[in-house]
Image (cartoon, coloured by chain):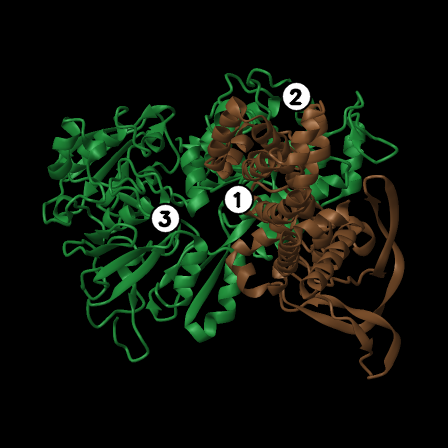
Chain colours: A green, B brown
Amino acid sequence: MKVPISMWLLALLLAGSLSSAGFASAKGSTNPQGGGLVPDNQPSAYSGHLVVALRSEPKTLNPVIASDISSREVIGQMTADLIHINRYTQLSESALAKSWKVSSDERRYTLELRHGLRFSDGAPLDADDVVFSFRVYLDEKVNAPQRDSLLVGETPITVRKVDTNTVTFALARPYASAERLFDSVAILPRHLLERAYSEGKLLQAWTLNTPPDRIAGLGPFRFKEYVPGQRLILERNPYYWKQDRSGNRLPYSAEITFLFAGNEDAEVLRFEAGETDIMNRISAANYFVLQQERASRGLQLYDLGPDLEYNFLLFNLNSTLPAGAGEIRRKQQWFNDVRFRQAISSAIDREGMNRIVYHGRGAPIWTHVSPGNRLWFDSSARRPARSLSHSRDLLKAAGFSWRENDGTLIDHRGVPVEFSIITSSSSNERTEMATIIQQDLSELGIRLQVVPLEFHSLLDRVLETHDYEAAVMGLDGGDVDPNSQMNVWLSSGDDHLWNPAEAHPATGWEAEIDRLMRQQMSTSAPRDRKRLYDRVQEIEIEEVPVVFLVSPNLLVGAKDQLRNFKPAILDSHTLWNSEQLFIQDRTGAVR
Amino acid sequence: MKRVSLMVMSLIFLAVIHLSVFFAGFFSPYDYAAQDRELPYCPPTSIHWVNKEGRPLWHPFVYRWVERAGGQRYQEDQRTPYSIHALTRGAKYTVGGMVTWDRHLFGVDPPARVFLMGSDGYGRDLFSRLLFGGQISLFAGLVATLFTLTFGVILGILAGFYGGWPDAIIMRCVELFLALPWLYLLLALRGLLPLHTSPAQAFLLFIIVIGLVGWARPARLIRGVVLSAKERKHLLAARSFGASDLYLVRCHILPEIRGLLLTQAALLIPQYVLAEVTLSFLGLGVGEPVPSWGGILATLQQYHVLISKWWMFSPGLILIPVILSYGVLSNSLQENRSQVGRWIE
């Protein structure tokens, strides 16, 4: 399974990312009530509306081409998937599919759709819509961002209609927790999009200017109005399929308004002023500001603990370098030595970094699995504390020494150790991390230059031209399940950041990670998968392919009048149960 | 007279600022890059003369800041006073790139810290960074002005003195350069520079480019003065006696434009100091960990700094009197250009 890294990075830059997971690899499941927790509170009327800010304006309402976080946030409210990962429990649960069965060879999934489902325009849903949707997503010409996530072992899954309410999916090989693949894959209305698809105009369909009656989905809300530069309004989907325990049809709120804030600071101002009801992914600094105002403004702030996001220092270990990159090749002699990487890792003050960058609301990390991923985090792995003397010993053993007059670190040829770190100029946090590393490594006599670059230029250098020496970057963990990381950790993966798409593993430990990751992917026993994945994390600590730094805590906020608010560590953190949310003041009146 | 006294006051203020900045290493208690990760965004340290028992002491002292209930809020730990010492030993520094020393005007014993103007987000002493930052910001103004005036003088004299096609070409270039969007030029330039170009080198290059791009306006002014000067009778007489062009420029033209150059310098220096602030705002500044006034001010782009870390405005508080002083100087020079010319002679 592949998730394009540019998508992750872009999503991370703007906010969050994809789905979730757990050990729930059910052989079959039924859930006639449909997903979500049972609401704690119920409103007296369907009249309320929610206001949420987006940091940027959505670019499209078309699920087939949406890759920016704002578009995905809006589309997520208008669409539904067959099997859904509950953001709160992190387990798979039935959604549009009432139940699913897995064949004995674990390569065939048969899904039965709920009866009587309707799109938001009133048209009925059947198996043909499902088949059409997957045909679109898997079409190479369409190049949908979902396509990579629907590949198992480089082979697309296949879909076949059994009857009006049943479809079968076939996988090229067994795949642990394969039902999680269906999460966030929106089912499309064939009656509205088939013509555009057959005419090759699907990518131009469903823009922000499309009339609302030409757009339909199966989510709790449907498109109502778009005012460029200001807001986008969704209204209640009267045909939505979920009901609460009392049999009331969800969603509770009549409308959701998305305001376009522009950036996080503007979003904080609007949240403080009471113009918005929910704030997603608050930076630690702004969380501190909001804390001062919390009581007087009637706000609730939530620190959900370490996020799945991980930040790291990456060395250029690519075997293919651009022409004229002799300087980088020379420095790769340092970077390729595991003792050099271990020395750098040992010299970095992760606690101090957490304190400075995240005001202490984060967690130091030594592997890509943050403590926030409670199911897969290897808590028993040894995590070496900061030690400059250990770093010096490692460097000495690797043939480095120090110049007597000024303490500069030099290699065995007498060349001073200095290199540049590129980072995204739009991320204050990562620039701060690079500056802290600069100071820490200066204590070893290493000179660093921090070069903030425009984000796309940074991506281009790391993924395409390989014209860089080191970089500070961040990735969202995506799903908590290890399979979401395959393209990063397999040496052949396009997103194997330090040396993408290797023809053969360049080192023995990369070959070992390849073996472990492939084995866990086809192992169904959760305990065995965990053991294999723990070993991957141990290798990361031993071999330091990248120097992991800090994971931030996930911080969100909401008005204290918001009912049923249950923020989750998985994306979408605050609106995953939007159908249950509503505003109710102290008198019990719904706004 | 009043104007002259204002000018003298401005000159004295500017001299004090420039000298403080030149000897930044001595006046600052810490190295500009030294981080104290226990004290990010720490407010200015209070200097005490009276201890907690109410007894006055003969020497000033400080209390150590300690964090209170997380979230970068601090309070004084009044259990132990730490005396402020004069001429303490500390981090090594160089003066004018030549003399290396480790004595600082004042300091306190660790673990206490004396942050006269608070600390920044990395727990670095803002007072030390302001002094060292002034070296970059004021240096940027001086170097860019030097380049601007050098090119302005050469091209202005060529255009005014010779006239004809050199004048036509130079004046068209002036119009072109006046219309050049220099910010975009610099952004493009940064994209082309190799990554291992050090931030200081890149910044110096930007300053030189700004200086070179800015020659057009002074060149046009100088051309005008030269055009009128070359028709003066004493210059015509000198030419009739066989004086060379070089002699005429050196002995008769340059003295005419000296006052103008001083006025222009007083106008351009603050402009270029502000240009440094703009460059830093756009991420084209000198780069971490080297400080500059613009770089420090750029942190105010973050909402939480803007509303709760008031001491981070301090570069702005210094910039205002510096710009005003240069403004007063420029006005005074303009009004007393002939008098200034006589002073120079």
**Dot 1 and dot 3 residues touching (CB under 8 Å):** no
Residue denoted by label 1: B282
**A387 or A436, which is in the foreground?**
A436
Quarter of the image where the C terminus of chain A is located: bottom left
* Residue A451 horizontal/vertical position (percent): 59, 36
Q: Which mark is residue A56?
A: 3
Label 1: state its secondary structure: loop
Circle 1: is it few (<14), some (14-19), or many (20+) Cα within 10 Å?
Answer: some
Q: Is residue B109 above or below residue B103?
A: below
* Residue B179 horizontal/vertical position (percent): 45, 36
Determine if marks 3 and 2 fall on one subunit. yes
Q: Which residue is outermost to the bottom? A: B54
Residue at 64% x, 19% y: name it: A329
- Say if residue B198 shows up in the picture: no
Q: Is residue B190 left or right of residue A446?
A: left
Q: Is residue A411 above or below residue B328?
A: above
The picture quadrant where one finds residue B345 is top right
To which chain does the residue with label 1 belong?
A: B
